[in-house]
Every structure is written in C-alpha cells, then in structure tokens.
C-alpha cells in the first residue's frame, strides 16, 4: 500500500497500523488483522486484558512489546509509539472492539504519527455503526454518525436541534444509564420518528427494537437497558415515514452465540 508522508529520513519498515477488531463475536476478525497483530513489533491496546483474550482465541503470537493506549494516556502512548517508529519498528494499534479513533482512542495517535511523517495504514474491521444501520430497518439511504450524545438533557436537546431538519438518519452510541433519557430528548426535539435501538451487537443477547421514539421510551422505562447500544433514528425524509411494525413484536436475537468477546 502506498501511503503519503510528509517527513524525510523515515526509518525503513516503520509503520503504524490501525487494526479493526471484533465488536462482539471473536470470529469477526479478518485474516489480514490476524497477520498484522502477529507480525507487529509492538501492539498498543485500549485494554490489554481484553486484547489478550483475542490473541489467545486465535493463537496469535504475543508481540515482543505490548502496552496500553486509552483515553487517559493517549498522549503518552503516542510519544512511545513515535519512539518505536523512529527505530524502524511496526506498531499495531487496536481498541477493545471496532476501529481505533471511532468513538475510541486512536485519533490523536494517528494524527501525531502522520504529522511526524510516518506511514499510517488502516486494517478495516467490524463496525457497530454499519452493523446497526443494516439491522435497524430504519430507512437510511444516507446517515450521519454522531457518536455519544452529551450527558445532560439541555445539551442533548441542542445536540439534536442541529440535525432536526436533516434528511439523514442519525446513528448514535449510548450507555444503558442514559439511553431512556436520550430517547426522551430526541422525541421532544425531532418528533415521534421511527427509530431502532440495537443492543449487544454480534453477542449472545443481540437485540434490535424498532418502534417510534415514544414507544421506545415507554419500553425502556419498564425494561431497564443493559449493555451498550447503537441507536438509529430516521431523518426528516419522506422515506422515514413508513409505519413501524407491531410494538409487541419480540426483538431479534443472534442465533450464532458460541463465541463472543467481553466487550462491544
């Protein structure tokens, strides 16, 4: 792969790999990811305990050097990665699941390494965003990924107001502790749109609940959320006005539940 760099005199072989890893089911890993993780001189992980389970499951040889790279130490980790690249080492960066830098650590590392002139290469992998859009049943010819909404109600309502007239579906991440409140604020600002709440994607208890926002609020007020969620909300678009199914319908559940990781 040809990668543009701005630096000169980069040590031969130096490269940072951004490696996508499974969001749940450990079988959802690419052959290329297995090779890169096994060949890298060093691996930087969001949580080494989670990543080592993946290494063990797929018999990936442990790299000579392994260290953490998470929200609280990313600047330090970036400096350490730069020093390894300066020695001509290859470094693989992965998170607990999904793509580094997508609502996960990794953005600053990639930016700093690229700005320093080192090649950065992506090894694509599973994504909760595209998985949820595909499963949602919400009309989404186009969509906007918004990450995690703000934590307070007032900030969330301003957050949704930015996209109130947008024809694009909105895709969000949310914790079980704020899911119901977030859905309530979305309903107040966007109206009673069709939406889908996708939980525990690719895991044993994967579920997709597709209803109007008001019905979702009612449901989760009596069925406390558990686990992490990806939410798809229809945009302000004619195709989003399809009638939802019977609210009493059961959520879908994954039939392939034999092999899952501990994090999504």
Image (cartoon, rainbow, N blue to C red):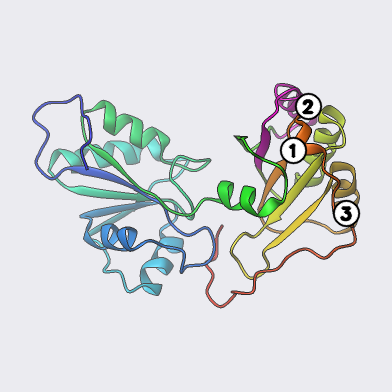
What residue is drawn where x is 40% and y is 39%?
74
Q: Secondary structure at mark 1?
A: loop
Q: Does the magenta segment cover residue 111? A: no
Q: How many marks?
A: 3
Q: Which mark is residue 77?
A: none
Estimate how packed mark 3 is, as few (under 14), some (14 to 19) or many (20 or more) residues with alpha carbons within 10 Å: some
Quarter of the image with the N terminus is top left
Which tag, 1 or 3, sits closer to the chain's start? Answer: 3
Mark 2 in CB contact with mark 3 (< 8 angstroms): no
Question: Residues under labels 1 and 3: Cα distance?
Answer: 18 Å
Residue 5 picture location, percent across and down: 21, 29
In this picture, residue 53 sits left or right of residue 249: left
Residue 86 picture location, percent across and down: 15, 38
Q: Which residue is mark 3?
A: 219
In the foreground, 100 or 77: 100
Which tag, 2 or 3, sits closer to the chain's start? Answer: 2
Q: Secondary structure at mark 2?
A: helix
* Disc nearest the viewer among 2 and 1: 1
Q: Which residue is mark 2?
A: 157
Residue 14 picture location, percent across and down: 16, 43
- Image quadrant in which you'd find residue 212: top right
Estimate how packed mark 2 is, as few (under 14), some (14 to 19) or many (20 or more) residues with alpha carbons within 10 Å: many
Estimate how packed mark 1 is, as few (under 14), some (14 to 19) or many (20 or more) residues with alpha carbons within 10 Å: many
* Disc nearest the viewer among 1 and 3: 1
Q: Which mark is residue 234?
A: 1
In the image, the segment drawn in magenta is 151-172
Question: Residues under labels 2 and 3: Cα distance?
Answer: 21 Å
């Amino acid at each position: 792969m040809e990668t543009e760099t701005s630096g000169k005199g980069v040590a031969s072989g130096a490269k940072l790999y951004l490696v996508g890893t499974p969001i749940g089911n450990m079988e959802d890993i690419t052959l290329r990811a297995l090779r890169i993780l096994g060949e890298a001189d060093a691996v930087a992980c969001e949580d080494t305990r989670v990543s080592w389970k993946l290494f063990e499951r797929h018999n990936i040889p442990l790299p000579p050097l392994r260290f953490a790279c998470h929200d609280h130490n990313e600047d330090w980790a970036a400096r350490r990665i730069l020093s390894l690249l300066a020695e001509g080492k290859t470094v693989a960066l992965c998170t607990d699941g999904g793509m580094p830098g997508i609502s996960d650590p990794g953005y600053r590392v990639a930016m700093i390494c690229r700005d320093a002139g080192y090649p950065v290469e992506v090894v694509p992998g599973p994504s909760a965003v595209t998985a949820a859009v595909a499963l949602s049943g919400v009309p989404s010819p186009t969509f906007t990924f918004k990450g995690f909404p703000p934590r307070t109600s007032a900030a969330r309502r301003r957050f949704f107001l930015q996209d109130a007239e947008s024809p694009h579906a909105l895709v969000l991440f949310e914790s079980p502790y704020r899911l119901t409140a977030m859905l309530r604020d979305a309903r107040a600002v966007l109206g009673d749109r069709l939406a889908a709440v996708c939980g525990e994607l690719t895991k044993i208890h994967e579920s997709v609940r597709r209803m109007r926002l008001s019905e979702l609020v009612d449901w989760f007020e009596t069925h406390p959320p558990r686990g992490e969620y990806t939410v798809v909300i229809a945009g302000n678009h004619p195709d989003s006005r399809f009638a939802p199914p019977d609210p009493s319908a059961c959520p879908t559940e994954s039939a392939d539940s034999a092999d899952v990781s501990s994090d999504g």
